[in-house]
Each structure stands twice: as C-alpha cells, then as structure tokens.
Image (cartoon, grey):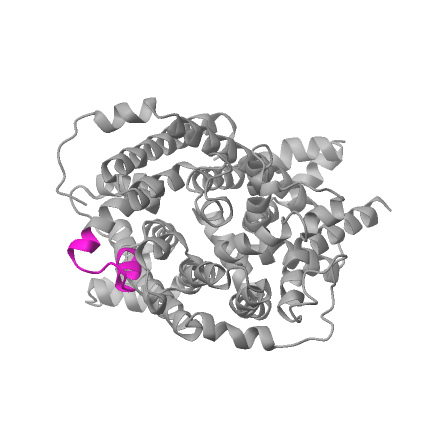
Amino acid sequence: MKGKLLDLVLVLGGIVMIAPLVWLIVNALSEPIDAFQLPPRWIPHPPTLQNFQQVPGLIPFARMAWNSVQIAVITTAGALFTSALAAYAFNRLRFPGRDQIFSVLLAALVVPVQLTVVPIFIMMRWLHLVDTTVAIWLPALVNVFGIFFLRQYISSIPRELDEAAIMDGAGHFWILFRVILPLARPGLTALGIFVFEASWNNFFWPYIFLSTPEKMTLPVGLVSLQGAVGGGPAVVLFAAITLVVLPILVLFLIFQRSFISSIATTGLRA
Amino acid sequence: MSTPEFAGLDNFEKLVTDGATIRAVVNTFVFALASVVTHIGLGMLLALGVHRTMTRGTKYFVRTAYFFPFLVSWAAVALIWKYVLDPTFGLVNYYLSATTNWLASPTWALPSLIVVDWWHTIGYTFIILLAGLQTVPAQLHEAARVDGANAWWRFWSVTLPVMSPTIFFATVITFIGAFQIFDPMVIMTQGGPDGATRSIVQYTYEKGFQSFEVGYAAALSLVLFVVIMIVTGLQFRLSRRWVHQ
C-alpha cells in the first residue's frame, strides 16, 4: 500500500517533469491565436505545421543543423582518437615524468573551458579563425576527461594480453588498435555518446566565437531566432526549438539502454 | 583589443573593490550550494524510489520522464522556461495562481534559475546515483536484515557507505558544473535584475567580450580557478572522513 502511494508520487512527478516539453510541442503545433491559452491546452486544436514553415525564412536552419552535426562528429572522432592514444601511453608505457604529467592533467580536469576562453579567443583571432566552425572543434580535439576516463578503462584490461602480443613482435599501435581498443569498446561508446551530446548542446563556446548566422550551431541559432522573432509570434520560436529537441528525444527512446548505461559508466569509472 | 601592457596587480585591486565582482562570487556560491543540496538530496530520494520494486512500466516511465530534460540543450531549456515562468501566460503562475514576475524579481530570479537548473540536470545525477545504488550487494542488506536492522538503519550502515564513492563523484561534478554556470543567465536574465543572477563566468563574459576589458576578464577567470581549486581540494580532503575506498 505504502509502495503504491510512492509509485503514484513518482509518476505524478514524472508528468510534471515532462509537462514543459509537452507544452512546447503543443504550442509549436498551434495557430498563433490558439497558442499560450489559459488554462493551458494539452492537445493542439487543430494541429498545424505553419509555424515550422516559417523557421527557414528567419534563420538558415538547415545550415545551422549541418554545422552542429559537422562539429559534433569531428569533435567526437578527434577526442576519441587522442584520448585513446594518451590513455594508452599513460597506462601502458613507461617514460620519465609520466606520473607527474598525469597529475598535471588531473588538475586540468577541474579547470573549466570557460577559464581558457579569453586566451584561446586571442589565439584564434591571431589565426584568423574567429567566426569559423574550426574555432569550435579545434580546441575540443583533446579532451582531458576522455583521457582520464579511458585510462581507467584500459587499466582494467589484463596486461598479459599485450605481453603476449609483444612476444609475437607487435608494436604499440598494433596492440592499441587490435588488442586494447576492441576490448575497450563499451568505454569508447560511453565516451563517444558523452562527447557527442556535450558538443551538440554546447552553447557557451559557439556563442562567443560565432556571429554570422550561416556559421552558427543550433543552440546559438535558437537564441538568435528569439531576437529575430522579436515581438512576433513566439510559436515560431517554439517550432524551431521543437525541431531541435524532438529528434534527440526520439533517438533517446530508441537507444535508451546504451545511453543510460553510458552515463552510468562515466559516473562509476571516474 | 590593444597590445597588452603589464598592469601589475591593478586588475586584482579592482577586483576586490568592485562590488559587482563580490556580488557575482556570492551569487555563484549560493547557486552552487543550492545545486548540490537539491541535486544530491532529491536525486538520492528519486534513485531510492525507482530502485525499489516497481512494475516495469512504471519504472520505465519514471526513469525516462526525469531523464528527458537532460537531453535538451541549455539554450532550448532557457528559452522554454522563459515562457513557462512568464508572468501573464506562463504555466507556473497559472497552476500556482500567482502573479509573480519570477525572472524580474530580485528575490525570486536566482531561486528560479536554481529550479530550472534542477529540472535540466537532475536526470544526470539521478542516473549516476541509481547506478551506484545498483552496485550495493543484496547479500549485505540480507545480512543486516538478519541482524535485525530496520530500513533506516540498513540505509545508513549499508547503502550509504557502499555508495559513498558515487555520491562523492556526483557532488564534485555538481559543484564544478555549478561554478561554471553561464547559459541560463545569458539567455534568461542577462545577470539581472540588478545583478541578482550574475555569475562569475557571465561577468567574465561581460567584461571580456562586451566591454573588452580583457585583462580584467582574465583576472576574473583566475578567481574562478582559485575558487574551484579550493572547493575541490577541500572536498577531497573531507572525503577521507566519509568516502569508503
């Protein structure tokens, strides 16, 4: 009986949690005069797609989506590659100063990117990369958390496996790519999902570096649309937000299991 | 930006005499403390609730519903909540029968952002705590039950100690994340009303990229660095007393 009551509280809480998202989608599907009614409507009446059609006229939406995809893919691939190399070196190789360098890296783990934005902005200006997508992915190619996380993961893979490969005359690259990384696949997947999600949703960095609409990513594009809509109907803004949010929610529902376990793994390993 | 000139300690002197800086540091600390309390406290209750025997459907719904907002980017969250909190046609005022202008009120603006942050990020904390909860061996609970320990005592003497590394990780991550808060301030309040929601990072942005006082922005960044280092170091030191290895 007590258990049932608690279930009910949790389910009601869950409904409250998703209410703003439902409200978003219902308003995005409503005619401007029907939107934002009180008491709030929870079913669009009648549903219309006209708000969605107005989005491309106000911001280059497709272009922004492409920029977001491009940056997220390059960042994820780059971060996975450099993290794997560095993690292998820190766990399996012996070289002078290894542990000292790793301690410095650990300290860098608590240094937020926000701290480095001023010096990196100056560097990017010097390289004439401000207001280009390169300025977004270039500094993200090395991911300190990724190195730390994969090093923890690789340290749980038995050394006997690479020792056997060394006996057979294998080099470090062969061991890393043929022995270690296939075994570390769950770790790589978890890190990959994590980095991709962070890049896709990143606002701070693109907001500072990108100013031309054609070069912006979706999160910055949404905020710029808020200005473009101005005093006009907010339903167009809601339609654009829906276009950004809905695909992610659907993807999550499909890949729920690996998504949840990747989040859980990054929490338990680190 | 002009060629840098060595300013000695000028920027730091300005820091301690600038009331806005102190306000931003205080706001950031309030935000960070409130984040940790609400994320870890309510996240733990949520994880315990979901971990109990529940029907599969209920479990699936509850887990998904609380996790969904975490997938939405801060930019989208901030824009949606600007409307949810709108004084005339927002959901919050309608259901609370209130007329408060949350984001324009010096008293309510920061608490509002704390609530929005909780809504957005609890899914992450919740999943990590739930995963930690699942590592607690059932045999330990069984043994404690045989020894006559009640539910509260079993939580205190079995669940919490086994989970302490996970709780520690979640606390450190939440703290560090909260000290870096920027997006909702820029999109929802611009640090206002009257500096009530201005965070350290947002003030750094204002100084560095709006008024182009780069040196001052760099000094502010250093303050954030020192704050995070001190708080994180302190947490590691304190952790020896309560985290089981």
Displayed quadrant of residue B200: top left
Q: Nearer the viewer, residue B27 or A213?
A: A213
Q: Nearer the viewer, residue B170 or B164?
A: B170
Magenta run includes residue A79:
no
Q: Residue at x 23, y 45 (%)?
A: A119
Question: Where does residue A226 sit, x and y in percent of width and height?
Answer: 49, 59
- Residue lying farthest right? A1
- Residue lying farthest front? A231
Question: Where does residue A146 sit, x and y in percent of width and height?
Answer: 35, 53
Question: Where does residue B138 sit, x and y in percent of width and height?
Answer: 66, 45
Whether residue B132 is visible, yes or no, is no
Q: Magenta segment, which residues? A: A123-140
Q: Residue at x 69, y 37 (%)?
A: B143
Magenta stretch: helix, strand or loop mostly? helix
Quick check: B69 left or right of A23? left
- Labels in figure, total: 0
Question: Where does residue B130 sit, x and y in percent of width and height?
Answer: 60, 48
| Residue B160 vertical position relative to residue A159 in the rendered view, above or below | above
Magenta run includes residue A139:
yes
Quick check: A5 left or right of A240? right
Q: Residue at x 28, y 25 (%)?
A: B14
Whether residue B133 is visible, yes or no, is yes
Quick check: A96 left or right of A156? left
